[in-house]
Amino acid sequence: MQTLSLAFHNRILIITINRPDKLNALNATVIEELSATMDDVCNNPEIRSAIITGSGDKAFVAGADISEFNTLDATGGRALAEKGQLLVFNKIEQSPKPVIAAVNGFALGGGCELAMACHFRLAGSNAKFGQPEVNLGLIPGYGGTQRLAHLVGKGRALELILTGNMIDAATALQYGLVNHVVSPEELLTKALSILELINAKAPLAVAGAIKAVNAAFDTQLNGYDTEIAAFGALFDTEDAKEGAAAFLEKRRAVFKGR
Ligand code: COA
């Protein structure tokens, strides 16, 4: 990997976007490498969950790489957004394994969008969020208009997108954009401890929950039907039988992901 560094801890893959001199901006290589890494997260049984964070103490990701914008026309711009959404942002959101963002500084434009594609977000107290594309004569293209509106509501999303203003971590917490704000030093530890808790649960139930909650935001689906189907399917798993048996036998369940 040229632009990502990967570390593995207790079956959690820590994905660090590693272009600190460019504030971890998302260029074509980052998008390709994130796409390949997400394939591994989804398909490698050794990986149970993942954290996405940025290298250095200044930025999570300061956006798409603006130096790649100059040569684009309407067709190229559309392809950039479409490819990114398909290969990375949607893949993260639809991952059956939890992916959380540990936002360690600027999360702007594509960086805010990357954090929002994750299942939930933790922020360091130094984090700053924004969608400043309007300053470039553009709008968010990696799903920001949709996910920000879902996460913080239409009015706040439009204010952020139309002004291009940044908000700090405390405001992001108040808006519901992030679940927790901790000191920068505690950020990774907090993310790991939440994922360790989730990793102790039945993986197929975790996957089913992600799928059903995602369906609440998919206008093509009836989320209640998705929930009913996922709930029902879990009764055929060994883990659901183990979960009920362990409860009745007053012992800790041992889940196998089957
Ligand atoms: N794309 C490409 N390069 C970027 C970048 C981006 N989105 N964001 C930062 N960089 C580069 C800068 O060009 C600079 O590179 P250089 O040292 O080779 O000149 C380096 O990262 C450091 O950034 P700099 O602007 O000097 O840091 P700063 O502390 O003064 O400002 C920001 C930090 C985040 C406020 C500022 O970098 C910024 O506004 N970035 C763009 C944010 C944006 O519009 N994102 C949406 C893109 S669609």
Image (tube, grey):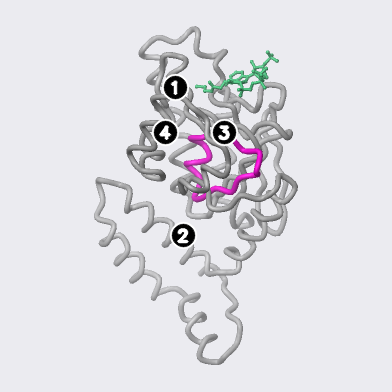
Asked if labels 2 and 4 touch by Cβ distance under 8 angstroms, the answer is no
Please state which amino acid type lies under the numbered disc 4.
Gly
Kind of residue indicated by mark 1 = Leu
| Crowd tier of the residue under label 4, counting other residues whose Cα lies within 10 Å: few below 14, some 14–19, many 20 or above | many
Q: Decide whether residue 211 is among the magenta residues.
A: no
The residue segment tinted magenta is 112-128
Question: Where in the figure is residue 116, as x and y percent of width and height?
Answer: 48, 41
Mark 3, ligand 1, within 8 Å: the answer is no
- Work out whether residue 11 or residue 174 is closer to the camera in this orientation and state it: 174
| Image quadrant in which you'd find residue 26 | top right
Residue appearing at x 52%, y 37% in the figure: 114
Describe the element under mark 1 as helix, strand or loop: helix
The residue at which mark 4 appears reads as 144
Q: Nearer the viewer, mark 4 or mark 2?
A: 4
Q: Quadrant of ligand 1?
A: top right
Q: CA distance from mark 1 to mark 2?
A: 29 Å
Total labels: the figure holds 4
Can you identify the residue that label 3 sits on? Answer: 107
Q: Secondary structure at mark 4?
A: helix
Q: Is residue 10 above or below residue 29?
A: below
Question: How many other residues sit within 10 Å of disc 2, few (<14), some (14-19) or many (≥20)?
Answer: some
Q: CA distance from mark 2 to mark 3?
A: 27 Å
Q: Residues within 10 Å of mark 1 (few under 14, many from 20)?
A: some
What distance separates the C-alpha of mark 4 from that of mark 2? 24 Å
Secondary structure type for disc 2 = helix
Residue under pointer 2? 207
Instruction: For the N terminus, give its image quadrant.
Output: top right
Question: Residue 253 at what x, y percent from top left?
Answer: 58, 80
